[in-house]
Amino acid sequence: MSLGGAVIVLLATVMGLAILRIIYAYSSVRVISLEVSQGSRPVCLGSAQNISSELHGSAMKTLGKLRQYFCGEPESEESEQTRCEYCPLRWVLHQGKCYYFSEEKRDWHGSTRYCSSRMASLAVVDSEEEKTFIMNRMKMEKGYFWLGLSKVADKWLWVAGAGLPPEKFQVAGGSDNHNCVVCGADEVMSESCFNPNKWICEKATKEFPAVKVDLLD
């Protein structure tokens, strides 16, 4: 297993244990509360609540450690309340979005399915700033990457919502069977949707809840 895969498994395990602890604590208090209300046997509700509090505190510490891993150490009480956005491993965070730049190649339809399986879509460029970010990133990558732009009934349409007008891209090429769009280091061009290329997925970032600094000690 690769190092990235091992980290994912570890984080998933830790998060799962934290959630199970909270569920167990909640269930314990619910059961004891029912026993008290039904008078089945004497119990110490205070002790059960203490156990619940301890388990909740342990789970919050775990969540805090994960927040530190993804977002860094909070510099102050004010900074701990700020939004902490993060992306999955191997995704790039930029302006509230996560981007995945593939290494393998697929046709446009296969690339679309891959992004969908990750709860994402092929990249939809909806601002000049985002266009600049992607084009600059292309200078660091090799090859051409599919965008979420294709021709439907002789009109260029984005796969999700309204992006920048296609003319802003100055899409090169114009062959009749070139109905999808790729971008490279220096150009954006039409391409046959059935040719294999790399691709760019995008989706919204995830956000960690605020965690008190004193829980992390």
Image (cartoon, rainbow, N blue to C red):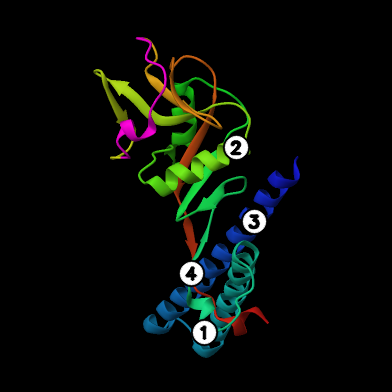
Q: What amino acid is at disc 4?
A: Pro
CA separation in Å, label 1 and label 3? 28 Å
Q: What amino acid is at disc 3?
A: Leu
Asked if one can make out residue 118 in the rendered structure from this viewpoint, the answer is no
Q: Position of residue 65 (x, y in %)?
A: 64, 69
Earlier in the chain: of badge 4 and badge 3, it is: 3
Q: What amino acid is at disc 1?
A: Gln
Majority secondary structure of the magenta segment? loop
In this rendering, the label closer to the viewer, 2 or 1? 2
CA separation in Å, label 4 and label 3? 16 Å
Q: Position of residue 193 (x, y in %)?
A: 43, 17
Q: What amino acid is at disc 2?
A: Lys
**Which residue position holds label 2?**
139
**Which residue position holds label 4?**
209
**Residue density around tag 2, few if under 14, some if 14–19, many if 20 or more, within 10 Å:** few
In this rendering, the label closer to the viewer, 3 or 2? 2
Q: Nearer the viewer, residue 216 or 17?
A: 216
Residue 37 among magenta residues: no
Earlier in the chain: of badge 3 and badge 2, it is: 3
Q: Which residues are magenta?
A: 163-176
Earlier in the chain: of badge 2 and badge 1, it is: 1
